Image (cartoon, rainbow, N blue to C red):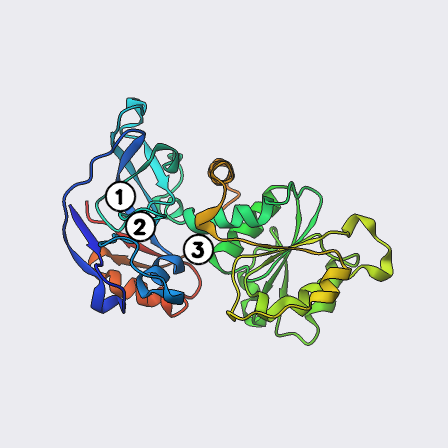
């Protein structure tokens, strides 16, 4: 099969190869997916770079965990009627050597949920790591129906899906962007939009949540910890309903992140840190079910940025490492 791989970590152009590898064979409980579109995420490029001193987990890695495609073979114990079914794939390269940057990938049956016929391959390939992370940020601490949820970095892959999932689940969503110029990119039907380059972002957020917010979904904890505390501070309002609010952080911009410990403590704040590869198995299954259901009724959309052929995988990785702009970076796999 045609595939891309790396045998050592380093710059994309130096270590990524494109060529022929043997076709994979599904084992018991697995399905083989003929990939049409492969999604590229920052997690994929960090593994390739050896980010934070990580080493090669396997002698050879076919990168990427996300994809859309069609099941063309199944292993023992899997319903043969799944052959021919359109699916989206998540976790293909999570603790496994062979991801979705290839004509075929093999994953456990439950990691290839059905993709409804009216949904595009581009959307399917964009749900995996960002979608399951977004679902966990929203629902790890229970339902959000009737709650106020603040989503930072709403134009990012995780933030956008988190805002849409929270809105789908009945929350009132307040969403932030860095620059006033980006406000037009936020759907007002999904979230109230705040730009962090305004003079008083805490006051702007409080204008929509005078009693404080219940949940904060955080992409830059190192930058926003004080702001987050200000929007959770209910001491003068004697509001027991907002006691024990939650900040859920899936990223930060400084490895040595500092937080306002005592103010957060006195506000009884729960700080939850999330790493997508290590979510509980049932949480991932529920996320896949909910993502498929929300997408099927039109509650989820994904902006697509650059699309590259498999031969240009190094350019796609460089684009992600450079920040990616607005929208997912996708690879089209030749059929």
Spatial CA distance of label 2 from label 1 is 7 Å
Horizontal arrangement in the rendering, residue 150 relative to residue 291 (left or right): right
Residue 239 visible: yes
Which numbered dot is residue 327?
none
Which numbered dot is residue 38?
2
Spatial CA distance of label 1 from label 3 is 20 Å
Marks 2 & 3, CB-CB < 8 Å contact? no
Image coordinates for residue 219, horizontal then vertical, percent: 54, 62
**Is the N terminus in the top left, top right, bottom left or bottom right quadrant?**
top left
Viewer-proximal residue among 239 and 185 = 239
The 10 Å Cα crowd at callout 1, few under 14, some 14 to 19, many 20 or more, is many
Element marked by disc 1: strand
Q: Residue furthest bottom?
A: 199
Image coordinates for residue 312, horizontal then vertical, percent: 23, 61
Image coordinates for residue 170, horizontal then vertical, percent: 65, 42
The 10 Å Cα crowd at callout 2, few under 14, some 14 to 19, many 20 or more, is many
Marks 2 & 1, CB-CB < 8 Å contact? yes
The answer to whether residue 57 is above or below residue 46 is above
Horizontal arrangement in the rendering, residue 324 relative to residue 60 (left or right): right
The answer to whether residue 18 is above or below residue 132 is below
The 10 Å Cα crowd at callout 3, few under 14, some 14 to 19, many 20 or more, is some
Q: Which residue is mark 3?
A: 303
Horizontal arrangement in the rendering, residue 15 relative to residue 302 (left or right): left
The answer to whether residue 91 is above or below residue 11 is above
Q: Which residue is mark 1?
A: 35
Viewer-proximal residue among 305 and 64 = 64
The answer to whether residue 240 is above or below residue 296 is below
């Amino acid at each position: 099969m045609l595939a891309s791989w790396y045998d050592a970590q380093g710059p994309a152009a130096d270590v990524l190869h494109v060529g022929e590898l043997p076709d994979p064979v599904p084992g018991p409980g697995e399905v083989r997916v003929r990939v049409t579109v492969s999604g590229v995420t920052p997690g994929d490029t960090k593994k390739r770079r050896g980010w934070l001193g990580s080493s090669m987990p396997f002698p050879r890695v076919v990168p990427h965990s996300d994809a859309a495609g069609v099941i063309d073979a199944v292993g023992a114990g899997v319903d043969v009627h799944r052959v021919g079914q359109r699916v989206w794939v998540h976790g293909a390269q999570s603790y496994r050597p062979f991801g979705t940057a290839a004509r075929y990938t093999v994953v456990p049956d439950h990691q290839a949920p059905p993709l409804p016929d009216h949904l595009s391959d581009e959307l399917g390939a964009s749900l995996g790591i960002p979608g399951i992370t977004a679902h966990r940020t929203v629902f790890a601490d229970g339902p959000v129906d009737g709650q106020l949820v603040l989503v930072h970095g709403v134009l990012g892959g995780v933030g956008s899906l988190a805002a849409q999932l929270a809105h789908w689940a009945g929350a009132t969503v307040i969403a932030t962007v860095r620059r006033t110029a980006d406000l037009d990119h936020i759907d007002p039907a999904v979230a109230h939009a705040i730009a962090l380059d305004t003079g008083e972002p805490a006051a702007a957020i409080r204008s929509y949540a005078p009693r404080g917010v219940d949940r904060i979904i955080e992409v830059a904890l190192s930058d926003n910890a004080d702001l987050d505390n200000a929007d959770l501070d209910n001491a003068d309002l004697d509001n027991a309903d907002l006691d024990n609010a939650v900040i859920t952080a899936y990223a930060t911009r400084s490895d040595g992140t500092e937080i306002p410990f005592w103010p957060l403590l006195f506000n009884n704040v729960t700080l939850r840190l999330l790493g997508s590869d290590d979510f509980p198995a049932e949480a991932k299954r529920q996320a896949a079910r909910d993502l498929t259901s929300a997408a099927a009724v039109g509650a989820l959309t994904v902006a697509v940025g650059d699309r590259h052929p498999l031969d240009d995988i190094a350019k796609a990785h460089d684009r992600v490492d450079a920040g990616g702009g607005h929208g997912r970076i996708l690879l089209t796999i030749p059929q």
